[in-house]
Structure formats: C-alpha cells, structure tokens
Image (spheres, grey):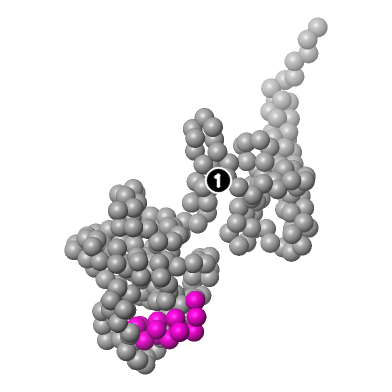
Amino acid sequence: MTLTAHPAVTRPLALALGLALAGLAQASEDEVKKSMEAFIGSPAVETVTRTPYAGLYEVVLKNGQLVYTDEKAAFILDGSIIDTKTRRDVTQARMNELSAIDFASLPLAQAIKQVKGKGTRVIATFEDPNCGYCKRLGKELVGMDDVTIYTFLYPILSPDSTAKSNNIWCAKDKVQAWNGWIVDGKEPAASDCDASAVARNVELGQKLRISGTPTIFLADGTRIGGYVPAAELELALEGVKTK
C-alpha cells in the first residue's frame, strides 16, 4: 500500500525544506568567505555568491578583483570563465556589471563640461593631465561630434599632476585650458582659486575604484577602462541604452 501525505502536511514540509536549504546555501557562502579571508590573511572579501556553473563560488574582493573558488576554498581560479554554448565570457560580463556606476549620481559640477555639436550623447572621463593616454584620447575627442564631455580632473600620477589640475580648474576658460594642454601641449598658466573640487574628484575616483587614467563612463553607467580610439568609442555610444 502506498501512503500519500495530506496536502496540508506536504506544503509546510516543503516550505520548511526550502527555507532550510536556503539557510544552508547562505551558511555555505559565509563559510567560503571565512575560508577565503583566512587564506588571504585579511578581511578582503566583499561578496561571495554561488554560481550556477561547476559548483563554483564567485568571490568579489574589496579591490574590485573577481576570482572563483570551490565550496571548501581548496582551489582558487583567477581567470575568465567561458560559456561554451554561447561563447560568452561570463566573467567579463559580470565584471562589466560590477564596475558600472549610477551615472546620474556623478557630481557633474566638479567636472569640466564641453559640448560638441548638439551634445545629445554624454560621457564622463577621469583624466590625469600628465597621462600620455589621456592626451591621445583628447586628440581623438577633437574629431567627435554630438557629444557632451564631462572631464573630471583626476591627478594621481604626481604632485605636478595636482598643480596642473588646479591651474586648469582655476582658469577663466576651463575648456580652453584643458584642451590647450592635453591636445596642444600648452602649459596651463598659474592660477589661484578654490580648487577643492579636484581633491574631491580624487576621493570620488577612489570610491569608484578608478586606478588608471583615462577612465570613461557612458550615460548608462558602463565603464571603459583605458584609452580607446574615436571609432571604438562611437560604437560603444551606439550601444548605450537610453531610458
């Protein structure tokens, strides 16, 4: 004879089992975090999430790095995972998600604003005036049209970078001073004003984990790390999803 439980009994049992399994999954992620931090030797883990592939756990470190490990943290994988069915780099896709920002939250008043053409497309850049790749980017941006550029002065390379940034920020025409230096190599004139916005930019960049310049943000929050030619930036702008 087959015994069948009454629905009134199975529902609570199923709910209890589901909650128990959820609790075990959470506890497992906590244990992975503890194991990883024990291995690293510091509280360096920001989040741990079980992935749907290969029993791996995604570990996001506080420095922005993403690695993978097993449930016992016996092995650590530092590299990309590729979905062979879709040929999609799931690690890069996840990194894009993690590095994206809320563009609307940027304090644009702390940036140098220049409008080219109608300026309907919008980007924000974090740049050091002594950054060679920033100078290359500046020359690329000269030829672009229909774009509004917010340049956050982000002096992280040297004390001279800070001095130049302050002089550019204090210039009567910030756009002219910036382009004069970054495109034409014309030294910004010494100037004095409240340049605290530059220091706030450095604090902001650190919060956004910007470790190199140039760093570009599109209007949808997508981050582009490093120099890109105008043609590549144009393609990226075409892919921006407007709300």
Residue at 50%, 57% in the rendered image: 99
Residue at 30%, 82% in the rendered image: 186
Residue 60 in the image: above or below residue 91: below
- Exactly how many numbered labels are in the figure? 1
Q: Is residue 20 magenta?
A: no
Q: In the displayed image of the protein, which residue is found farthest to the top?
A: 1
Residue 28 in the image: above or below residue 87: below
Rendered location of residue 122, percent (x, y): 30, 61
Rendered location of residue 50, percent (x, y): 65, 43
Residue at 35%, 70% in the rendered image: 135
Instruction: Indicate the amino acid at tag 1.
Output: Thr
Rendered location of residue 20, percent (x, y): 74, 38
Circle 1 is placed at which residue position? 91
Rendered location of residue 205, percent (x, y): 49, 70
**Residue extent of the magenta highlight:** 157-169
Q: In the displayed image of the protein, which residue is found farthest to the left?
A: 117
Q: Secondary structure at mark 1?
A: helix
Residue 137 in the image: above or below residue 96: below
